[in-house]
Structure formats: C-alpha cells, structure tokens
Amino acid sequence: MPREYLKKATLTAKSDASEVHETVKAILDDIEKGGDAAAMNYAKKFDRYEGNIVLTEAEIEAACALVPDKLKDDIQFAHDNVRRFAEAQKSTLTDVEIEIVPGMIAGQKVIPVDAAGCYVPGGRYSHIASAIMTVTTAKVAGCRHITACSPPRPDVGVAPAIVYAAHICGADKILAMGGVQGVAAMTFGLFGLPRANILVGPGNQFVAEAKRILFGRVGIDMIAGPTDSLILADSGADAHIVATDLVSQAEHGYNSPVWLVTDDRALAEKVMALVPDLIDDLPDVNRDNAFAAWRDYAEVILCDNREEMAACADEYAPEHLTVQAADLDWWLNRLTCYGSLFLGEETTVSYGDKATGTNHVLPTSGAASYTGGLSVHKYMKVVTWQRATREGAQRVAEATARISRLEGMEGHARAADVRLAKYFPDRNFDLSAND
C-alpha cells in the first residue's frame, strides 16, 4: 500500500530566513567595526548583562563551588564517556606515507586546528551537555586554544554547571556572552581571544544564521535548524515508551519535528492517544513547546513493511533515528541516513543527548543525507605532502607537462620542463600535447 499519514504536519521547520539574515548580518557588521565595545552593547541589550565578559579564574572557581557534588559526578561521568569515544574516533585518523611510484613519496598528515570556539546554549535551558560535547572533542583533537561561550543570565552570569563542565572538559577561556555577539566575539578575536578557526555547537536561529554568514572565513561544524527525531516501531514496540520518547524530543522547541513510522496501525493509534496526556503532564514551558511541536510539526506514518519504513526514514534523514523493532542488526545494516542511530528500547535519544559518549551536535533538516555530526574529526585537517628523488619525479614530470599543455596551461607545463632540463640534460623528452 502507499504511505498513509495518520497525522500530517501542517508546518515545516523553517524560519523567516530573509528577516533573520538581515538582522544577523547587521549585528555582525556592527561588531566587526566596533569591536569589544559593540559586542558589550549587544550583551547589554540582548542578555541584559553588564558583568565581566571573560571569566577570571576566581569567577570560575566560585561558579564551580556552587555545583552540587552529585551533579559534578554526573558531569564527570558524561565527560569521561565523550572523551573515550572521541579518543577512539581520533585513532581512526592516522598519518600516512606511501611510495606512489619508485622515488615518488606522498603522504597524509593530520593536524588539529589551532583555535576552536564552542557555543553552549544557556537561555531557556542550560545545555550542560553541549559544553561537554563541544569542548571535550576539541580538547581530544588537540586544539591549542578552546573558548567556551554561553549566554549569561541578568545579574548572574553563565550557569555554574555550564562553567564547571566547560572548565573540567578543557576550555581555556569561558565567555559570558550569548547569541550573535558571542559568535562574533570568537570569530573576530575580541576580548583578547585568538580568532577561532572553527565554530561549533548548537544554538537558536540567530546563532545558526551567524555561523552560516561567517562560514568561509571560519569553519563551522554544520548549519543546524530545529532538532528533529524519527522513531521506527513495529507491533512489538511498547506504545508508552514510543510516545514518551516522541514527547521527550518535542519539548526542545515549538518547531521541533517528531515523526513515528510504523507498519502497525494499532500501535500508531495507541501512541497518538497517549501523547496528549504525556505532554499535559510536563512543566509549563516544556508543555507549551511539546504541544506546539506535536500539533504543527509531528507526523505519524503507516507503511506496509519494514523495507518501506526504512526507505521512509532514509528519505527524512532525521537528526535522531530510533529503532524499536525486531531484528536490530537488519536495521543497522539497512539504514543509511541519520545523524545518530539508537537501536532498541534499551537506549534512547536522551541518553545520546546527555551521557552516552556519542556527540549530540548532529545534522538537522535532512542534512544527515550528506553529513554526520560533530566529532573529533571536525577539528582536524587532513593535509597531504610529497617529496621525490629526481629519478622518481621523471615520469611524473613528463605526464604533468603533456597533460598541462593539453589543458592549455603552459605555465604548469614549464614548471615540469625546467626540472627535466636541469636533472636530465642529456635526455630528449616528447613534452608536446597529444592530439
């Protein structure tokens, strides 16, 4: 049967891109011209904060002292998991050296970027986990300088738990500044910071647009939209757990899509019946977000079989993809488009968001069809090098000269010619372009 939508989204997760773009561009231009003073003016305007921007050691120590020991233990646990996974990822990138032809050696070298800027959301929710995910991976990669930047609260500053997480994970500087002005400060090297080579971390539509505009003069992890999640479930799935997982992701924001794809109508109908009460049981702000996300952006899709379900998931390319269905190995081998995959009822997106060790900074809005999420690799440049003996370069020089002339690039050809003439003065080479 064709795909049947038991619930269809009435909206898509798109912002008014043109309006946001113009607003962000104006702020970036103003801060680039005005420097520290302009950035501080925006902090006062948007964050309603006039305190110290770059936290001192004493301020960091004071903030850390406010964090309960149990929470410190949990943050350390999550940090250790993220660090171990990042170290395993890093081990998959190695320097390489190979003799392409006798006397011609080429190589690969892996070099971390010098300075990383890590944005940590801290407005409606204090994203402790984002500090762990971004700073830890930058540290494992070997970045020389890491700045963590997070919005301060009026007359309070950055949430103590975010300060603690950024500090123990290896941030060299912690910046009490949010939004576009925070991104600009790291990019332009304000407040005595080195200019960031890469910007990473989640943020609202203004932060995302700032990264989009700045991309090119600085690297970014990805251009992210609202978070999204898809669950694949068969008749054996627990409807209450499926519904709870959908609601847990819908609370991210009013425009955070959640999708259920199943081949069992009874399960779908039961989940749809359970969701409203689960949303109603949430605290106020969370409830409002989840209610709007479920009402306007959620979809429930009925498929004929598991192959059709998998095809649907690949088409949506969700940020988070959960499988609560039989034969998990089949799904692992079949599915190809997702930011992070959660196999079985025993795991959940919430685990990955907070403490599993895999990163929660992931591609959204279908970007998982062509890219993965933040990893230690994002901070590392894979560069190449070569060297050769004169004999080893001979055949390469001949081929270079002829190919270059065929392309019409005479200057390139002559760079090969002069070497052949110098190294092999007694030899005659046919370096003309082939017809």
Image (cartoon, grey):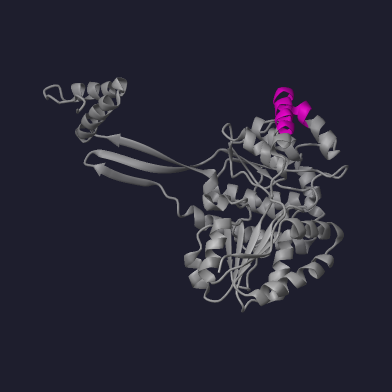
Report if residue 23 lies within the magenta region: yes
Q: How many marks?
A: 0
* Residue with the most extreme front position: 1
At a point 76% along the width and 72% down the height, the residue shown is: 273
Give residue 415's position: percent from left, percent from top.
28, 23
At a point 73% along the width and 59% down the height, the residue shown is: 250
At a point 56% along the width and 33% down the height, the residue shown is: 216
- Residue 243 lies, with reference to residue 255, above or below; the image says below
The reply, left or right, for residue 96 in relation to residue 266 is left
Quadrant in which the C terminus is drawn: top left
Give residue 317's position: percent from left, percent from top.
57, 56
The reply, left or right, for residue 246 in relation to residue 329 is right
Report if residue 51 lies within the magenta region: no
- Residue 213 lies, with reference to residue 238, above or below; the image says above
User: Quick one: 17 or 308, which is closer to the camera?
Assistant: 308
- Residue 366 lies, with reference to residue 331, above or below; the image says above
Range covered by the magenta-colored residues? 22-39
Quadrant in which the N terminus is drawn: bottom right
Q: Quadrant of residue 280?
A: bottom right
Q: Quadrant of residue 114?
A: top right
Is residue 278 shown to the viewer in this render?
A: yes
Q: Quadrant of residue 263?
A: bottom right
User: Quick one: 38 or 67, which is closer to the camera?
Assistant: 38
Is residue 338 shown to the viewer in this render?
A: no
Give residue 113's position: percent from left, percent from top.
54, 40
Give residue 225's position: percent from left, percent from top.
66, 47
* Residue with the most extreme bottom position: 236
The reply, left or right, for residue 157 in relation to residue 260 is right
User: Quick one: 155 or 80, which is closer to the camera?
Assistant: 155
User: Quick one: 299 or 86, which is closer to the camera?
Assistant: 299
What's the magenta bit mostly, secondary-structure-wise?
helix
